[in-house]
Image (cartoon, rainbow, N blue to C red):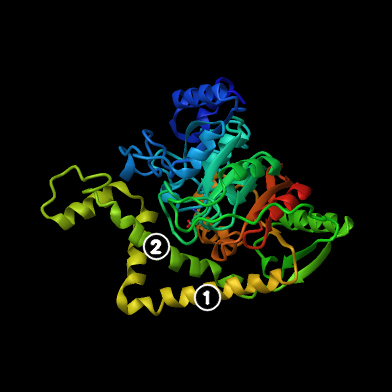
Amino acid sequence: MTVERAVQRAISARPFNALITETFDTALNHESNALQRGLKPFTFVAKDCFAYQGVPVTCASKMLENFTAPYTATILQRLVENGGSLLGKANMDEFAMGSTSTHSHYGPVKSSITAGNLDNDWRIAGGSSGGCAVAVHSGFADVALGTDTGGSTRNPAAFHGIVGFKPSYGTLSRYGHIPLANSFDVPAIFANTVADCERFYGIMAGVDSYDSTSLDPLPRPENVDLTKLTIGIPKQYVHPMLSDDTLDAWNNAAKLLESTGCKIVPVDLPHTEYSIICYHILAETDIASNMARFDGVSLGHRASDDAPSFNELLATSRTESLNDTVRRRIFVGNYYNVRENRGKYFQQAAKVRRLIKQDFDAAFAQVDVLLTPVTSHSAPLYSEVRAAKFKSRQRQDDYFTQPANMAGLPAISVPMGTCSNGFPLGLQLIGNYLEDYRLLAIANFLH
Ligand code: GLN
């Protein structure tokens, strides 16, 4: 769409609070350059943990409130070089920690699926890349770049009835991305259709000399015979917290695939239940070291009062500028990191991670893809996530999405109708490592 049109839509979508920074002038420049070069322009937003030179990058935190990116992330550069116009930086959970997009220094994202008045209560956008989902759903971004460390793209995509694609680890460069947990972090794509996802993935994917973990996905297979696929249904994903609507959508999708000739088989992923706890040990350990750079001295918010000592300066700067979740995770990560605890927690979790990966390897020896839920329910109301009883559920939110990050596998959330309450639902397809294009071909069929 044209930038002019996108800007009008972005302005009407302001009540959803999807953008932290609007870059409409930058977008107009990008568009005119694209037109001059004979390219077909498109609009995009990037989660506010990606750097674009000269534009603020905040990670939705007071810590980076006044920080401007000194360079540009490779994948943003690739989009711009291929006709993309950057419309803005999308709101998110602070430092990408969360699954609701309600924990932002710039206020919560309100989902554009919400019907009616947004003042008192609204549907949450999911997270942590909630602003990206709203940008695509409310129609001002043709594509949005989020991140997915444990589900942060697939979860909000499912809540908005759009497509959310987390590629194989490494196939999208992380250069210019402010990390959450390095060995899980994957830049990820929101779009309206699987075909769009594939197009934008094709523009961005592949080796980047600035990211030593980057690599190319396998080439697109010539023909994927969609009538001869074997689809795995992991037993451990039939979980008591699933709503009846989600269970029905899952069953219906399996039946649909079966009716076209696919074989549906149950598979066993026995270590699934340990995934979340291992994720939090491994992620928090990374978080503790990643966040050490935000000290208020070389980088980030500095405490306003003159601190009596260096240590107090650090402590006050962080206390003033990081939310409870971020500070709790730094604290816990340092606990896991001390010498006497490392063997007890980090190393054990790393071993279980390998077992989770081996479960997937065994599954993919028998099946082409796995079909699972993305979330247990449709998007809850803000008032529901604030209620105490929701807190225990929150950690479970990533139950269906985190294991794919553990194993670095490509996974995609595709819209799968609506719940009885009228709000969207998604289903997930997980593919084998580096078979991203094959997964996209299959997802295109299901969508
Ligand atoms: N909900 C998970 C967390 O808070 C995953 C977040 C993400 O994927 N960025 O760590």
Contact flag, marks 1 and 2 (Cβ < 8 Å) = no
Counting from the top left corner in percent of width and height, residue 420 is at 74, 46
Disc sitting over residue 170 in the figure? none
Q: Identify the mark nearer the N-term, 1 or 2.
A: 2
Q: Amino acid at mark 2?
A: Asp
Q: Position of residue 146 (x, y in %)?
A: 52, 45
53 horizontally vs 135: left or right? left
Q: Quadrant of the N terminus?
A: top right
Depicted 304 relative to depicted 118: above or below:
below
Q: Position of residue 52 (x, y in %)?
A: 42, 37
Q: Secondary structure at mark 1?
A: helix
For this view, does 88 lie left or right of residue 194? left
Q: Which residue is mark 2?
A: 286
Say which residue appears at 60% left-offset and 32% top-offset: 138
Residue drawn at point x = 54 percent, y = 27 percent: 10
Amino acid type assigned to the residue bearing label 1 in the image: Val
Measured as percent of width and height from the top left, residue 162 is found at 66, 42
Instruction: Tell me which residue sits at (56%, 39%) in the image.
Output: 144
- Res 428 quadrant in image: bottom right
Q: Is residue 51 left or right of residue 122?
A: left
Q: Compared to 220, does 266 lie above or below?
A: below
Element on which disc 2 rests: helix
Q: In this view of the protein, can residue 138 be seen by the observer?
A: yes
Q: Nearer the viewer, residue 68 or 99?
A: 68
Total numbered badges shown on the rendered structure: 2
- Residue drawn 49% across and 66% down? 279
Up/down of 175 relative to 67, above or below: below
On residue 352, the disc is 1
Q: Residues within 10 Å of mark 2 (few under 14, many from 20)?
A: many
The answer to whether residue 375 shows anywhere in this view is no
- Distance from label 1 to label 2 (Cα)? 17 Å
Q: From the viewer's perspective, is 394 left or right of 319? A: right
